[in-house]
Image: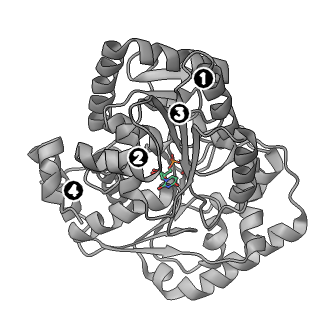
């Protein structure tokens, strides 16, 4: 795994030195991240890389994953959907399962979380853990990765009862935040440019991956990489592809995705996607195992067009990943995609399958303009969405909470 020093070629030596200086203030502190899945989805992706880097900086960092039954994950998925605005009714009995599961996990994590200096609780799944730690010594941060700007009111009211007990909350973008009686921080997520998902690959390898899936790179390829989740709008992607195919008959579509262990809906959506693609041999639905990082990297590098046509999106790491590979993205005009896709500069924002189809045709036609946008996209990510920036924000947040600094931090 890449060492901190290796990032200086990408972001400059000063950035790395600054991280080391900040981390001096946190040497030996115990930090625990808690979430609900080890693989699948953006949170796991980020923690996989962030945790080793924090350790390298001398911070005693752990990552724990809560466990639960299918019923628990059904409840948290419903909560997730309701918090992102779906009109879902969650029966009282499921809320009981939610709290009971958190109580059981709290028991297992008791000593570790009670003695930690900082605890990051990621997303709603483990949010009620805090209720079981009245003796906690450290600062607890609720790190919300999803869009809760227009939640189902009663679900948010329920969850808020737990969240108010935290010392701070972190949201990915301003639009997602809710009013809370503690400091709120805005920290967008990031990608790791040196991970298998994002490091440079040679062209031969990229071609070999496409060959393996029987996809012909001589013909244009549209790609969307996403869990099979309805908010990612895979059916809308198929519709866009079909509209384009009327004009460009050799067009191919690749929908690459897997399911996350904390997402019980994946299979249903996958079946719907298969049904909607019918027997079109140019639609390739790839169900990838969780460790397909280099494969995804190659798919993103080889595609002509990258879509992320989400209708709701926390941040959209797949967008960042594509942009880092100098690919402008056609993205849904929602959530964190809006922060990354600067319309007409680093990609295009779209609201409908028709809009996406129009932009696909534009990009295929104006290759030079597309290349120019791709270069801008890469620089935009370098400046804003790499893991070194993310690490700096987390270190700053921890320093300010531990030392109760409200306005400024002095580093030597
Ligand atoms: N991803 C993956 N395999 C898949 C689908 C997605 O490794 O089959 C990765 C993807 O490359 C990205 C992350 O999972 O790094 C998804 O993060 P994003 O923020 O785009 O969406 P989320 O799944 O968190 O809603």
| Residue 279: x %, y % from top left | 70, 41
The residue carrying pointer 3 sits among few (fewer than 14), some (14 to 19) or many (20 or more) residues within 10 Å by Cα, namely many
Q: Which residue is mark 2?
A: 210
Mark 3 secondary-structure assignment: strand
Whichever of labels 3 and 2 marks the residue nearer the N terminus, that label is 2
Report the side of 217 relative to 28 (left or right). right
Task: Quote the CA–CA distance across marks 2 and 1.
Answer: 20 Å
Task: Quote the CA–CA distance across marks 4 and 3.
Answer: 48 Å
Whichever of labels 4 and 3 marks the residue nearer the N terminus, that label is 4
Whichever of labels 2 and 1 marks the residue nearer the N terminus, that label is 2
Residue 78 placement: quadrant: bottom right
Report the side of 57 relative to 141 (left or right). left
Q: From what the image shows, is residue 273 above or below residue 2?
A: above
Mark 4 secondary-structure assignment: helix
> Would residue 24 be visible to someone looking at this image?
yes
The residue carrying pointer 1 sits among few (fewer than 14), some (14 to 19) or many (20 or more) residues within 10 Å by Cα, namely some
Q: From what the image shows, is residue 281 above or below residue 166?
A: above
Residue shown at the point (83%, 68%) measured from the top left: 94
Residue shown at the point (76%, 45%) measured from the top left: 275
Query: Which quadrant: the N terminus?
Result: bottom left
Q: Which residue is mark 3?
A: 252
Task: Quote the CA–CA distance across marks 2 and 4.
Answer: 43 Å
Whichever of labels 4 and 1 marks the residue nearer the N terminus, that label is 4
Q: From what the image shows, is residue 381 above or below residue 24?
A: above
Q: Which mark is residue 22?
A: 4
| Residue 4: x %, y % from top left | 18, 59
Residue 322 placement: quadrant: top left
> Would residue 352 be visible to someone looking at this image?
no
Residue shown at the point (67%, 61%) measured from the top left: 263
Q: Which residue is mark 1?
A: 245
């Amino acid at each position: 795994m890449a060492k901190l020093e290796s990032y200086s070629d990408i972001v400059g030596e000063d950035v790395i030195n600054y991280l080391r200086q900040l981390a001096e203030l946190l040497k030996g502190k115990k930090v625990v991240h808690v979430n609900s899945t080890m693989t699948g989805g953006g949170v796991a992706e980020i923690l996989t890389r962030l945790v080793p880097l924090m350790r390298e900086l001398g911070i005693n960092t752990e990552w724990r994953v809560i466990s639960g039954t299918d019923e628990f994950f059904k409840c948290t998925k419903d909560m997730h959907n309701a918090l992102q605005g779906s009109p879902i009714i969650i029966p009282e009995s499921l809320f009981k399962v939610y709290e009971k599961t958190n109580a059981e996990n709290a028991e297992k994590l008791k000593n570790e979380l009670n003695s930690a200096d900082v605890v990051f609780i990621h997303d709603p799944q483990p949010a009620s853990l805090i209720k079981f730690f009245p003796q906690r010594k450290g600062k607890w941060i609720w790190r919300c990765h999803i869009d809760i700007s227009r939640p189902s009111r009663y679900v948010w009211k329920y969850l808020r009862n737990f969240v108010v007990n935290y010392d701070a909350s972190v949201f990915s973008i301003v639009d997602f935040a809710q009013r809370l009686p503690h400091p709120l921080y805005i920290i967008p997520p990031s990608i790791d440019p040196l991970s298998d998902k994002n490091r440079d690959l040679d062209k031969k390898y990229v071609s070999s991956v496409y060959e393996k899936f029987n996809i012909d790179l001589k013909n244009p390829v549209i790609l969307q990489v996403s869990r099979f989740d309805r908010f990612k709008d895979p059916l809308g992607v198929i519709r866009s592809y079909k509209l384009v195919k009327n004009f460009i008959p050799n067009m191919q579509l690749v929908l690459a995705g897997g399911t996350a262990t904390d997402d019980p809906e994946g299979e249903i959506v996958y079946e719907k996607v298969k049904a909607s693609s019918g027997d079109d041999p140019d639609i390739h639905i790839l169900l990838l195992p969780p460790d397909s990082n280099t494969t995804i990297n190659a798919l993103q590098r080889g595609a002509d067009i990258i879509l992320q046509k989400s209708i709701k999106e926390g941040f959209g790491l797949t967008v960042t990943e594509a942009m880092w590979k100098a690919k402008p993205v056609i993205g849904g005009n929602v959530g964190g995609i809006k922060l990354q896709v600067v319309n007409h500069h680093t990609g295009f924002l779209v609201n409908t399958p028709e809009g996406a189809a129009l932009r696909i045709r534009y990009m295929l036609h104006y290759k030079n303009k597309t290349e120019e946008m791709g270069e801008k996209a890469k620089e935009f990510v370098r400046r804003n969405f790499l893991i070194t920036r993310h690490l700096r924000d987390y270190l700053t947040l921890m320093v300010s909470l531990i030392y109760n600094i409200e306005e400024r931090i002095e580093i030597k």
